[in-house]
Image: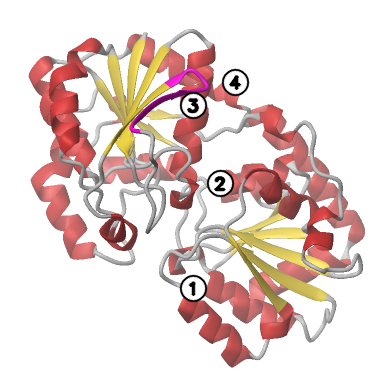
Amino acid sequence: MKILQVIPYFVPAWYYGGPVSAAYNLSKELSKRGHSITVYTTDTLNSEDRIKENEETKDGIKIRRFKNWSNSIASKHKIFLSPSMISGIRNNLKEFDVVHMFEYRTIQNIIVHHYAKKYRIPYILQAHGSLPRIMDKQKFKQIFDRLWGHRFLKDASKVIALTSAEVEQYKRMGVSDKKIEIIPNGIDLSEFENLPKRGEFRKKYGLNSGQKIILYLARIHKIKGPDLLARAFAGLIKELATAKLVIVGPDDGYLPSLKELIKELGIEEKVLFTGPLYGREKLEAYVDADVYILPSVYETFPISVLEAFACGTPVIVSNQCGIADVISSQAGYSVEYDKNQLHNAVVAILTKVELADRFRKKGYKLVREKFTLSRIIEQLEHLYLNVTV
């Protein structure tokens, strides 16, 4: 099949989080299976830089990048304007058998919707948790939905939900049950076959073997709950003086506020900010962590949790995370968005060796049984082959 993937950002723009990894891994695996995969995206790399190559082939994926009008606006407001993509889609869309649109409220989706309807090309939408109108820009989201969003949800051949909770979100937006397919995120386990040796991350950042590493690895945004983690940690170190909070990830507008909070709590010396880590360095952080925590206000299906499992790291998430029911008391803890509950869960994992070991083994087993990329791709491939206008 000739498949077009459309996403505002693509590798190596890891700055923009989970959807980048998801789109890349799916495209790479589909290419391995003999499909012709093309990605239309923008040239944004992060808030300041652009990717120089307008066209390239990576891992069998043909990537075409269109100039993004302003990386600053894109970073601050998640608005990616790429006017030159209009002609690209208008002139080439008829070449493809199906289009897969990643994310929901994007200018790129408006363009695809218009021409997909005109040329009668089936398209699939995967919102990646972006449907709810929560946190910031709620008025903008409401206007977008009225002008465009409801239309291209209605006209989609299929929509992909990551979890049963996201199914309900689609239904609240007026999408019928028949159009919704649940396909969770998955990871390529080949990337975790030769993990770094324990201690490499500690050595690099001057942490000794006796320190307990509490790892946060995500965008530094209020929706991810780093403030709740900081408050819970401030109480935690009174019981576990050897604990170290390691915060890994790019700033998504909340870093100054988080640093100010950490200063107010008087825990600066107990907190390490590394900035974003990718590839081998990211794996080193997971491997050396005693627990990985993602206490989000809202989260659909974070790939970082699967990565932690694959590295044998116990996990704690908030119950607002779409994968919480899979994790709860099996491979880690799911807790309410509550400082005391988070505190107690961390203490339990850091002080009970047998519990931590059980969570490590169960998480490691879980990701291999249910969330391998090969398993996920079979579902997606079947969807592509059977989709119609």
Give the alpha-carbon distance from disc 4 to disc 1, as whole Å.
36 Å
Going from the N terminus, do you reach mark 4 or mark 2 first?
2
Q: How far apart are marks 4 and 3 (CA)?
A: 9 Å
Question: How far apart are the alpha carbons under marks 1 and 3?
Answer: 31 Å
In this rendered view, identify the residue nearer to me: 172 or 87.
87
Residue type highlighted by circle 3: Leu
- Per the image, the residue denoted by label 2 is 323
- Residue under label 4, please give it: 374
Q: In the rendered structure, which amino acid carries the disc numbered 2?
A: Ile
What residue is shown with label 3?
A: 26
Amino acid type, callout 4: Ser
How far apart marks 4 and 2 lie (CA) works out to 19 Å
Closer to viewer: mark 4 or mark 2:
4
Residue drawn 54% across and 80% down?
259
Q: Is residue 252 left or right of residue 263?
A: left
Q: Depth check: give the residue in front, 344 or 286.
A: 286
Can you give x and y, in whole percent of width and height, for residue 112 in the image?
19, 30
**In the displayed structure, would residue 95 be above or below residue 306?**
above
Which secondary structure dominates the residues rendered in magenta? strand
Q: What stretch is highlighted in magenta?
A: 54-61
Q: Which badge, 4 or 1, comes first in the chain's sequence?
A: 1
The residue under the point 79% across, 71% down is: 347
* Local secondary structure at mark 2: loop
